[in-house]
Image: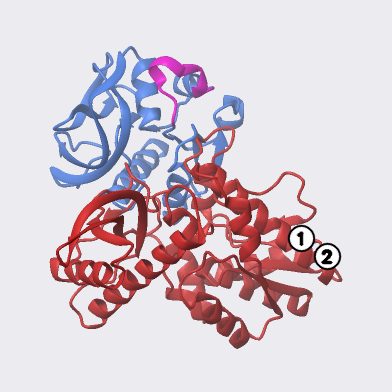
Chain colours: A blue, B red
């Protein structure tokens, strides 16, 4: 069984990420973000949850997320604060969103090559964020955007690192489970 | 959602967990509001430890119209040991002058435990069983998570509680609890969610017996009209639907006379797990019937009705 853990950055929906992975028959567990990377070395993939910290000014509340991003050889999916932290870690500026998004977000997908494989171009998803990623980190590309937020999803060009600003783990996000399935497929491909 | 939740597997695990947490001859009380979470927990506990279990329902004066009788009947049908604690005066006394929603929730949480402690002592129980589900502890917050609202059964628990705690549903959401409830044949399986602090959090600001009576009647009308519309196939039954008393007054006109009364906010939402929700697209006809019935039958208290059109996030389902 594949082992994909969820790093808890204090999100309201961290446990939903755990639930989706459990439903997808993956061995999963929620771990604090202070867990040493050594204890996570043997995983097959990692999800970095969202959380209340404003990464721009409270980055220290993100514990060892940076270490995970530097050392993990397996795929990593950052969600909301996890996505923002990932982008900042690789060089992006963060700041208060020009227009924050709470609840319904109209997502347009430009790049279906990996986590959005088989998902329609335009879908309705659910977001909840005060801050946003202002520029694309070097070596990353934008996969999706919304009318209020240009950088809704990113992928790294040479490592299996993915970030989504919205919340694919909640019931109101369309194609949420499919995105997780795609992420698990990327893990399987990498393992093969 | 793809994948599935295996309720039979869950039932076996939960019964085992309860048995190992409460080994014979130890006894337990279960906090029983009559909602699906506590009734499922009671059914599992009854399977696990039989008559070493006592269910306690607290009539705190904050329950809905007819609710105490309805829950008593359910507990009777289940054939479990139960007691009804009639303690409305204690609650209203403790809530006097308190306006802050978090403070209200904490006072109510502590009161619950003090009542359960009394019954536990009498029964000789050392463990408190609760139907706590995932959103309760998630939203109550901890070192890692912000407190959105202190659920009475988590954030409202006093630190000096003299009982161990057993919460077999901690990792479940409402949709999963209902699945378990149907498998166990629990009568409460389709009851709509109702918050632990009950009508106290539907009565914004200070809670008084008079305000609770207003919101109780308004909640009854909302529930009754929506149920009738759903039964007639006119409207889908929302996940949760109720009234909130907004304690600021506005001007109206009734029979050529000036009126100055409270506002009732009607809330109806669609959800699966309570962690996200959209407001229900009730028909204007249903909303109109609710509005007319509330303002006609409650004319001396209410002269305005509004419909809440916010999702969660950014709002929560209950207003406090």
Q: Is residue B5 visible?
A: no
Number of marks in picture = 2
Q: Position of residue B44 (x, y in %)?
A: 63, 72
On residue B121, which mark appears? 2
Residue B208 percent coordinates (x, y): 50, 57
Disc 1: which residue: B117
Magenta region: A52-63
| Left or right of A120, for residue A94 | right
Q: Which residue: 59% across, 33% down?
A: B143
Quarter of the picture containing the N terminus of chain B is bottom left
Residue farthest to the front, as pictured: B257
Pinpoint residue A48: horizontal percent, then vertical percent: 44, 32
> Disc 1 sits on a residue from what chain?
B
Residue A111 seen anywhere in this rendered image of the structure: yes
Question: In the rendered view, would you say B116 is above or below B110?
Answer: below
Q: Are marks 1 and 2 in contact (CB under 8 Å)?
A: yes
Q: Nearer the viewer, residue B303 or B72?
A: B303
- Element type at mark 1: helix
Q: Residues within 10 Å of mark 1 (few under 14, many from 20)?
A: many
Seen at 25% across and 67% down, the residue is B295
- The answer to whether tags 1 and 2 share a subunit is yes
Residue A62 magenta-highlighted:
yes
């Amino acid at each position: 069984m594949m082992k994909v853990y969820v790093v808890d950055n204090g999100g309201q929906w961290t446990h939903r990420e755990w639930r989706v992975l459990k439903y997808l028959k993956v061995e999963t567990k929620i771990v604090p973000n202070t867990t040493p990377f050594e204890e996570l070395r043997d995983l097959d993939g990692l999800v970095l949850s969202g959380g209340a910290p404003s990464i721009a000014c409270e980055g220290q509340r993100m514990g060892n997320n940076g270490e995970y991003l530097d050392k993990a050889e397996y795929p990593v999916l950052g969600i909301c604060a996890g996505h923002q932290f990932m982008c900042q870690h690789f060089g992006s500026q963060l700041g208060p969103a020009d227009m924050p998004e709470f609840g319904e977000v109209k997502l347009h997908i430009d790049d279906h090559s990996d986590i959005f494989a088989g998902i329609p171009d335009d879908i309705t998803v659910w977001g909840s964020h005060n801050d946003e990623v202002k520029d694309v980190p070097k070596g990353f590309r934008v996969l999706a955007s919304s009318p209020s937020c240009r950088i809704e999803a990113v992928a790294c060009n040479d490592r299996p690192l993915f970030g989504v600003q919205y919340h694919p783990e909640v019931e109101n996000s369309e194609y949420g489970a499919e995105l997780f399935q795609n992420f698990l497929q990327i893990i399987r491909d990498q393992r093969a | 959602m793809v994948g599935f939740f295996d309720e039979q597997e869950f039932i076996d695990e939960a019964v085992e967990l309860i048995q190992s947490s409460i080994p014979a001859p130890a006894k337990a009380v279960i906090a029983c509001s009559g909602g699906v979470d506590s009734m499922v927990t009671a059914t599992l506990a009854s399977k696990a430890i039989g008559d070493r279990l006592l269910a306690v329902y607290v009539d705190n004066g904050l329950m809905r119209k007819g609710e105490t009788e309805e829950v008593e009947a359910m507990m009777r049908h289940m054939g479990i040991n139960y007691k009804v604690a009639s303690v409305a005066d204690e609650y209203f006394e403790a809530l006097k002058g308190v306006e802050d929603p978090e403070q209200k929730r904490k006072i109510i949480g502590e009161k619950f435990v003090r009542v359960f402690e009394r019954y536990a002592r009498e029964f000789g129980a050392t463990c408190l069983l609760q139907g706590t589900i995932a959103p309760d502890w998630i939203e109550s917050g901890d070192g890692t998570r912000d407190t959105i609202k202190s659920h009475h059964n988590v954030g409202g628990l006093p630190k000096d509680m003299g009982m161990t705690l057993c919460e077999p549903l901690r990792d479940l959401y409402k949709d999963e609890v209902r699945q378990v409830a149907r498998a166990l044949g629990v009568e409460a399986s389709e009851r709509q969610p109702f918050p632990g602090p009950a009508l106290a959090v539907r009565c914004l600001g200070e809670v008084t017996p008079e305000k609770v009576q207003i919101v109780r009647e308004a909640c009854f009308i909302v529930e009754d009209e929506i149920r009738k519309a759903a039964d007639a196939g006119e409207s889908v039954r929302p996940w949760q639907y109720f009234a909130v008393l907004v304690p600021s007054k506005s001007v109206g006109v009734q029979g050529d006379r000036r009126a100055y009364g409270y506002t009732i906010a009607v809330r109806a939402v669609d959800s699966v797990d309570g962690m996200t929700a959209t407001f229900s697209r009730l028909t204007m006809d249903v909303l109109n019937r609710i509005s007319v019935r509330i303002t006609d039958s409650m004319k001396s208290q209410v002269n305005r009705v509004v419909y809440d059109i916010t999702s969660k996030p950014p709002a929560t389902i209950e207003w406090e």
